[in-house]
Image (cartoon, coloured by chain):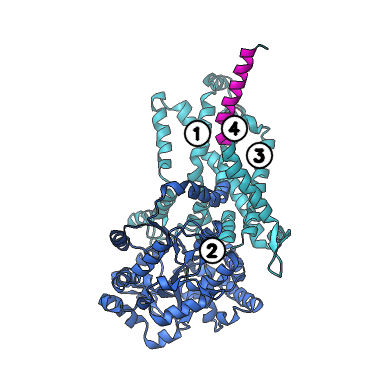
Chain colours: A cyan, B blue
Amino acid sequence: MNTSARAKNRNFRWGLLFFLAPVCLWLFLLIVLPHIDLLIMSFRAENDMGDMVWSLSNYRNFFEEPVYWLTYVRTAIYSVLVTFLTFCITLPLAFYITKVVCPRYQGFLTILLLMPFWVSELVRVYGWMILLRESGVVNHFLLKIGLLNQPIEMLYRDTTMVLGLVYTSMLFMVVPLISVLESLDDSLIEAAHDLGANTWSILFKIIIPHATPGIVSGSIVVFMLTLGNYLTPNLMGGKNSLWFTEQIYNQFIASFNWNQGSAFGFLLLIISSLIVWLGLTLSRQKLGKVVQ
Amino acid sequence: MKQKTLCIPLLMLALLIFGFGTVSAETLQLLTWSGYASKALVDKFEAETGITVKVTNSNNEEMIAKLRATRGAGFDLAQPSQDRVQSVQEKYKIYQPIDMSKVDTDQIIPAMLEAVKKNTTVGGKAHAVPFCWGTSGLVVNKKLAPRARDYSDLMNAFYNGRIAYRLKRPTLIGLAFAMGENPFAKYSDPKAYRALMERVGQAMIDAKPFVKLYWTNGDALLEAMRSGEVHVAMAWDGGGWKLFNENSNIDFVAPVSGALGWIDTFAIPAKAKNVEAAYKWINFVLRPQNAAAFTNSQKYGTASRGSLEYLDPSVRDNFVRCFPPIHINNIKWYPPVPAKLEAIEGKILDKVKAAR
């Protein structure tokens, strides 16, 4: 190797280091370091004398107290359900935008989808609350046209909470689906029609297999966001809506028990990793490929 | 999302470190309750002293958690309730003792000052001075629920779907009093306290179907009362009186088993940067005219001596109407909360929230 090539190579390394440093610092200082601290904290507990000792009691508490693990399971199941519903709603939507509608309107429709996300989640959730509450817009309307005799409470139900969560996470499913469906060759669908395939077999044999990477990456994002959501379950679910993130918040803020809270945090991390891994295995996708 | 929640303490720290250069010496970082530092007072203070006040709204639990995360840095003045200072200070050391020579104690009602000093003393030094006081009790729509008089009405099937309260410790305490118990007497005996709280929790779970919502935000509750969605709620007297001004059917009711009396204080965090400004703010807000302005807008009484003559007549009427002497004498003032009770209560509240 001659000297100029070596110098170039070294320059390249320095450049790489320079651009990578902020990312590494960010990852290390704001994600890895606090997590190590939390991991240590989760294995420490107060003994009867009031001293901090190493102990597994934070994790034992979780398994011994039905309230905790029931909420945990409930949160996981609802998150999977929300992910599935989001997929069911957004696939036809994405297909319509990419394949059916006149190309001139594609951008416009995508922007319409994006628009609600220009305001914060809190505002959107309060918007739903104004619509659905007992003295709200929907009830008022139904009373006016005579469908109801007296207003009903639509908020503070599990269905409302799922609705809110699906609405909040739709965008994160639609965008990967649109990009993956754009690369689908229309002639494949036309050929299938020519050969006498019906709509369902086109959907399951052509569209879904082609869109799998997009579906999986969208599902991962939606699942993670739903599992870690605090605001929507808390505000729209009302009195019955205990979500696992709220348990973590309660441990940290209301009970001042940071050790228990960090144990809960790690349990949440474990279940989200587990379910994502399970989803990847079942759909035979590779994480590295899906996130591209 | 999860990473985000976990990172908040560290992010705050980072912001603080980077903030050093930009924050000038003449700002006051105030950690308080919403409504406690009104724009009018903040502007007046700024005009008088040239000190900018940066207000962060919070509640007791979050105040403690925030200060604990930074070991008492980031704020120059906090306003915890008097019962939440002593054990917190013993355990986390997030406040510094109050220098009484810098506080204009002549402005403060002596009995209240002494009570707060006594309840916040750690290592022989007081850590707080009183600011305002009020009670928790019932806010009732008297037209629709004329007979609601005690905390037990929060579990009354008669008001099915029209009940609201907070899932926080005052509710547990109030319901325990309504059962004829005295939870404060059991503060020193965690076992008996846990047994009592479990009974209260079970009663709350049994009566859960009647509840409309567990409110977390005062404005949301006021809105639900205004629209007639909620008829009986447990809330602070000030909120009830605000509603009374708009609709005389809705009013605060001191429960038969006793309204729960709280005093919010001024406490200076351990690593406050602008301690002088903190004392200036304390003396400024407790000046009779300013304290009266606070009471007129928020309806809570203050520890300021001599503010009475500046009060609006309607505010004075609130006290006369809702607190005849028999109710005043029946107010249950919170004693300092010992450590560990929060964990007991937290678990009970989680169970109530998770119950079907």
Disc 4 + disc 2, Cβ < 8 Å: no
Disc 3 + disc 1, Cβ < 8 Å: no
Q: Could you tell me which chain the residue with mark 1 belongs to?
A: A
Question: Is residue B146 in the magenta section?
Answer: no
Q: Amino acid at mark 1?
A: Val
Task: Estimate the spatial distance between the alpha carbons at disc 3 and disc 1, rounded to whole Å.
Answer: 20 Å
Query: Reading the chain from its start, which is encountered first: label 3 or label 1?
Result: 1
Q: Label 1, on which residue? A: A175
Measured as percent of width and height from the top left, residue A46 is found at 69, 64
* Residue bounds of the magenta highlight: A3-23
Q: Residue at x 49, y 71 (%)?
A: B127
Q: Amino acid at mark 2?
A: Ile
Helix, strand or loop at label 1? It is helix
Task: Estimate the spatial distance between the alpha carbons at disc 3 and disc 2, rounded to whole Å.
Answer: 46 Å
Measured as percent of width and height from the top left, residue B80 is found at 47, 68
Q: Are marks 1 and 2 on the same chain?
A: no
Q: Mark on residue B94? A: 2
Task: Estimate the spatial distance between the alpha carbons at disc 4 and disc 2, rounded to whole Å.
Answer: 44 Å
Q: Label 3, on which residue? A: A279
Q: Quadrant of the N terminus of chain A?
A: top right
Helix, strand or loop at label 3? It is helix
Q: Mark on residue A291? A: 4
Q: Which of the 4 quarters of the picture holds residue B350?
A: bottom right
Task: Estimate the spatial distance between the alpha carbons at disc 4 and disc 1, rounded to whole Å.
Answer: 13 Å
Q: Is residue A262 left or right of residue B308?
A: right
Q: Quadrant of the C terminus of chain A?
A: top right
Q: Amino acid at mark 3?
A: Gly
Question: Is residue A13 in the magenta section?
Answer: yes
